[in-house]
Image (cartoon, rainbow, N blue to C red):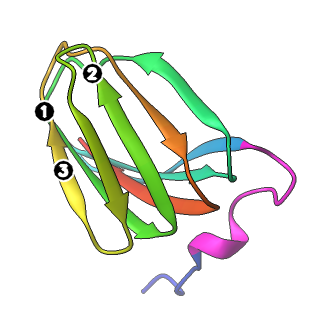
Amino acid sequence: MDKSSSLNNIHANDKNVGAISIFKGESSNVTSIQLLEKSVLKEHSTKIPALLLCVTGKVLYLDENEQKIELSSSEYITIEPNVIHKLEALENSQLILVK
């Protein structure tokens, strides 16, 4: 059995944007994302549906379809494939992305 880990300990505290894969399965991938306050995860898209969970903090999800969704701790959204989107950190935040 693997020992437990903390999202707080896997990212550099001085890096505005960080993404680290924390699990890879046969058909899935789980990524931990850290965004420090006022930082931006630049526009990008996904080829497959994804789930984005805000663990701590507060972020703003914006996409090309003019969706503007604020996510706080324990809130999540699904991200549709091929939709260009970005994230803006309203405060220091930890997120989990599941694809």
Mark toward the viewer: 3 or 1: 3
Is residue 15 part of the magenta span, yes or no? Answer: yes
Local SS, label 3:
strand
Front residue (pair 22, 3): 22
**Residue 52 at what x, y percent from top left?**
28, 50
Q: Amino acid under label 3?
A: Ile
Precedes in sequence: disc 3 or disc 2? 2
Residue linked to disc 2 = 46
> Is 13 included in the stretch rendered in magenta?
yes
Point out residue 13 in the picture as x, y percentages from the top left corner: 82, 60
Q: Main secondary structure of the magenta part?
A: loop
Give the residue at x 53% y 62%. 94
Disc 1 to disc 2, C-alpha distance = 7 Å
Residue at left offset 33%, top offset 30%:
62
Q: Which residues are magenta?
A: 7-16
**What is the C-alpha distance between the residues marked 3 and 1?**
11 Å
In the rendered image, residue 11, in percent from the top left (x then y), is placed at 71, 58
Give the labeled residue for mark 1.
49
Determine crowd level at label 3: few under 14, some 14-19, many 20+ residues with C-alpha closer than 10 A.
Answer: some
How crowded pointer 1 is (Cα within 10 Å; few <14, some 14-19, many 20+) is rated as: some
Residue 99: percent from left, percent from top: 23, 41
